[in-house]
Image (cartoon, rainbow, N blue to C red):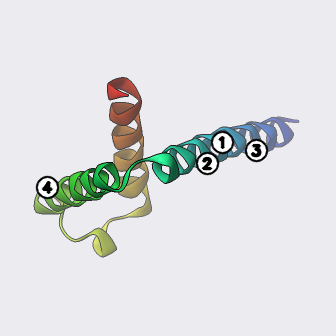
Amino acid sequence: MFSKLRQRWAEARADVASKEAADILERYARMPRADKDLVVRAFEAILSELEDQSGELRRWSVDQKKQIARYVMHSAKKDF
């Protein structure tokens, strides 16, 4: 019984994450070129800072990547 609930919960979370990602990509696609460049530079700066703190991205554990992704998404939502 609980495995079915966990599975449904995971599916629901994946659906929400998928919709959020699609929304972000759609907003990015509608941005003027100058704004897109700012977003890319901001992402590069954040990634550089995170790699300074936690080492190279390719060496991060899956759990580290998830934690950082949650933090970045939370910050982006709050600031948007």
Sequence-wise, the earlier of marks 3 and 4 is 3
**Label 4: few (<14), some (14–19) or many (≥20) C-alpha neighbours in 10 Å:** few
Residue underneath mark 1: 19
Q: What is the residue that sits farthest to the left in this orientation?
A: 52
Q: Quadrant of the C terminus?
A: top left
| Disc 3 secondary structure class | helix
Residue 58 or 39: which is nearer the viewer?
39
Q: Disc 3 and disc 4: Cα gap in Å? A: 32 Å
Cβ–Cβ under 8 Å for marks 1 and 2:
yes
For marks 4 and 1 on the same chain, the one whose residue lies earlier in the sequence: 1
Q: Nearer the viewer, mark 4 or mark 1?
A: 1
Task: Indicate the position of residue 45 as horizontal and vertical percent values.
Answer: 17, 56
Q: Which residue is mark 4?
A: 49
- Say left or right for 44 vs 67: left
Label 1 Cα neighbours within 10 Å, binned few <14 / some 14-19 / many ≥20: few
Looking at the image, which residue is at 34% across and 42% down?
A: 72
Q: Residue at x 19, y 55 (%)?
A: 50
Residue sitting farthest toward the bottom: 58
The kind of residue tagged 3 is Glu
Mark 3 or 4, closer to the camera:
4
Q: Nearer the viewer, mark 2 or mark 4?
A: 2
Binning the other alpha carbons within 10 Å of mark 3 as few (below 14), some (14 to 19) or many (20 upward) gives few
Which label's residue is closer to the chain start, 3 or 2? 3
State which mark lies toward you, 3 or 1: 1
Residue linked to disc 2: 22
Residue designated by label 3? 11
Mark 4 and mark 1: Cα distance apart in space: 28 Å
Identify the amino acid type marked 2: Ala
For image coordinates 14% across by 55% down, the residue present is 49
